[in-house]
Image (cartoon, grey):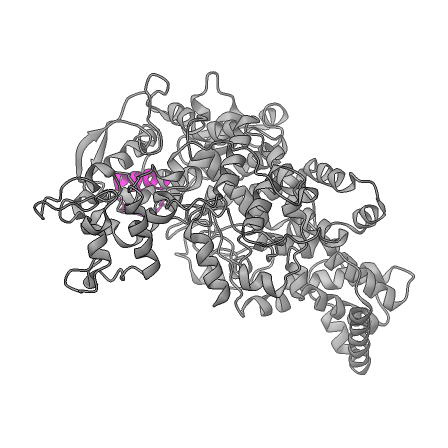
Amino acid sequence: MGGVLFFASCLHSNRDDASAAVSFNFDIRPILSDKCFKCHGPDASHREAHLRLDIPDSALAPLKNTKGAFAIVPGKPDQSELYRRVSSPDPDYQMPPSDSHLGALTPQEIILFREWISQGAHFEKHWAFVPPVKAPLPEVHNTKWIHNGIDNFVLARLEQLNMQPNDEADKERLLKRLCLDLTGLPPTLARMNAFQQDNNSDAYERQVDELLATPQYGEKMAVHWLDVARYADSYGYQDDNIRTQWPWRDWVIHAFNENLPYDKFLTWQIAGDMLPNANKEEILATAFFRNHKYTEEGGVVPEEYRIEYLVDKTRTFGKGILGLTVECAQCHDHKYDPISQKDYYSLLAFFNNTKEVGYEGDVSVSKPAKLPILSFNDSDVHNTLSFINKKDTGAMTVSVMGQRDTFRTTYLLSRGRYDAPKDSVQAAGPKAVMAYDTTKFPRNRLGLAQWTVSTNNPLTARVFVNQLWQEFFGRGIVKSAGDFGMQGDLPTNPRLLDWLAADFMEHGWNTKRLVRQIVLSSTYRQSARTTKEQLEKDPENIWLSRGPRSRLSAEFVRDLVLSTSGLLVPTIGGPSVKPYQPAGLWESATSGRGVLATYRQDHHDSLYRRGMYTFIKLTVPPPIMGIFDASNRDQCEVRRGRTNTPLQAPAMLNDPTVLEAARVLAQRLGSDNTSPDDKIVKAFRTILCRTPSAQEKQRLINYYNDQLSVFQKDPAAAKKSLEVGEYPRPKITDPTAYAALARTIDLLYNLEETITKT
C-alpha cells in the first residue's frame, strides 16, 4: 500500500511545481470527467438539469432547476450546490447518483473540490489544447548527472519526490539497449568488442551516430508508423484478397532514413497529391490513408462502405496524429471532449472529396490496388522512386489519394448512419484544438495538412514526441498515447513534454535530432537495476528513476533470433514474405475465393527476412506475432498492449524459426577450432550481448554435457533434432556434439533476458 499511497500523493498535483494552488486541469477536471461529464458535459443530448460543468459560462451560472442556487460560487464552497452534493452522505441528494454506477467521490477528491472552490474556482482550458511552451530548464542539485535538457526535468521531479536516479548502465547492457532501440537488432560481437575497448569520452555518442546512419534505423522507426497507418497486405473482410501497398512501406523506411522533417512527413501523407507539381513520391506517401480495409463481397451498398472508409480515415487522423478519440462524436456529441458531432463531420469532410468509391466489384474481379491509383514502372524506380525494392519488370499500382474535380457536399449523419443525412457542414478542424482560419488554410486536405503542422497547433508535436518517447521508455509521458482528451491520462511530467514538443518544432521537426536527444540523456542511459525502495515508490517507473526494461515487440523477437544466428537476410524493403506458419490457419478461415485462400510458404532468402516484412492477412494475422502482442492492423494503433501469457513460452520453444536458428548458430560455431566451453561463451555473448558470469557459464556447460550424454545414448534423436528448417545442413559424421550445442543455444533463446531490451 505504501507505493500506491505515494503514487497517489504525487498525482494529487500532477504538475512540476510545488504550488499549493489546486489546478482545474490536473486536479479537478479529471474528477469531473470521470464522475460528472456523462450527464453534465459537452454532449447536449444527454445533459441533465441544463448544467454543463466543463465551461465556466454554464458552471458559474444560476441553476435553472433550483431557484436561487448556483452549482459553483467562487470562494464559497458551502454555498456551492456542486460541493454540497458531492460531499453529502444522503444517497437521495448525493452526486453522482447511485444509479449512475459512477461511484461516489473519495474523501481526497471532496477535499480537492473544497480547496479549489475556496481558492476562487478558476477554470483552465484543457492542458492539451494550449500550445506547448518551452519552459526554462529547472535547477537541480545533482548537476553532474545532467547531459541535456531532458535530464533537468526528470531530475527536478525526482528531487522533488526525494528520489535519486540510477547510475549509468554498464557498457554491455547499454549497447544492447541502444542497438535494439535504434535498429531493432542486437549488436554484433565486433561492435561489442569495439565499444568495450573504446575508452574515449565520446565513445557512446559515436555509437549513437553510427547507428542512426544505418538503413536499419529506418526499418525500426517504420514499425510503429505501420501500426498507426494500419498497414496490411490484404483487403480484409470475408474474402480478404491480396493488395500491393508495400511500396508505401518502402517509402516510410526511406523517409525515416532520409530524416524527412515530421511536418513534411505528415503533409505528404495527408495531401501529397495536392502539392504544386506533385511528384510520384509525394503522391505515394498518401497511401497512408488508403491502408484501411476494403470490401470485395457481393451485394453490398457502395455508399455505406464509402462512408465506412471515410470514418476509418477520420479515426486514423484523430487518433494517430491528433491523439484524440474523435470517433466518439460520430453518432452524437462527444461525452467528454469539446468535440461536437458537427465538428466530427467537418473533419470527415476533408476526405469526402476524394475519387475513392465504396465498391469496385467482388473478389472475382479483384485488383491489387483500388482507385485512385498510382502506377509506376522501372523507369520511375530508377529515378524518383529509387527507394522502392521492386522485384519484377512490370508496372505496379498502389492505392493512393486523389481529389475529385467536382465538389461533394458533406452532411452530418444522424446517429452515424450513411443513409440519414441532416445538415450540411463545411470542412474544418476541431475548433477546440485550434481555430480553422480559412484565410490561411483552404477547406481541403492541403489546408488540413497546413493546419495540422502549424506551430500553433497544440497537439501534433506533443502527440508525436509522446509516441516516440513511448518507443524508448515503454510508456509515454502521457500513458494514453491515443487520447490526449479529458478521459486520457495526465502527463507525468507536463513541462518536459511541452519542452520537448516546442524544441522539436523549433528545430525544424527534426526526428533524428529528437531521437539522438533522448538516447544521449542520462535518463535513458540509466541502469535498469531496481531497488526495494524504487519498487515501493515507483513500481511502474513513471518518474524514471531507473532505465527502461521491457520485452521486445513481436517483430524484433524474430529479428533478434535471425540476426544472432546469422540467418537474417538484411535486404531493405520489397514485397512481404510468408515464413513458417502452422498448417491450416488460412484454410480454416477463408471463403475459398481469392489468391489468399491457401497459405503458400516462401522459401530460401524469403524465410529469413525481418519481422516487419511478414505478410499480414487481416482475417488471419501471423500467429506468432499475435502471441507477442503485435497489432493485427485492422485499425489505427498507437500503443501496443504488453502481456505475459503462457503461450509465449511454448511459442519460443516450438517455433521452427527459433529451432532452426539454434541449429544454424551451432553449425557456424562448429567451424570454430575452439572447445565446447568457448563455443558456449561465444553463443552467450552473441545472443544475450554480455559476458556470462562464472556461475552462468558452469550451468550452461553442465547442461551441454547432460544433453551430450542423452544424445550419445540415442544418436537417432540427435540427428532428428537437427532436421528442423530448410537452411542447408552440413554432412556430419557424429551429430551428438552438434545437437547438444544446438540444444544449449535453444535454451539461451528461451531465456527471458534474451528478448528483453535491457
Q: Is residue 699 left or right of residue 334?
A: right
The spot of residue 494 in percent (x, y) is: 47, 42
Depth order, front residue of 336/143: 143
The spot of residue 615 in percent (x, y) is: 54, 50
Secondary structure mostly seen in the magenta stretch: helix
The C terminus sits in image quarter: bottom right
Q: Quadrant of residue 484?
A: top left
The spot of residue 334 in percent (x, y) is: 27, 44
Q: Is residue 410 left or right of residue 668?
A: left
Residue extending farthest to the left is 67
Q: In the figure, 265 relative to 46: above or below? A: above
Q: In the figure, 400 relative to 581: above or below? A: above
Q: Is residue 491 visible?
A: yes
Depth order, front residue of 11/556: 11
The spot of residue 403 in percent (x, y) is: 37, 25
Q: Quadrant of residue 149?
A: top right
Q: Quadrant of residue 460?
A: top left
Q: Is residue 404 left or right of residue 705?
A: left
Determine if the magenta segment contains residue 306: yes
Q: Is residue 572 visible?
A: no
Range of the magenta residues?
Answer: 295-312
Q: Residue at x 35, y 39 (%)?
A: 126
Depth order, front residue of 74/581: 74
- Label count reads 0
Determine if the magenta segment contains residue 232: no
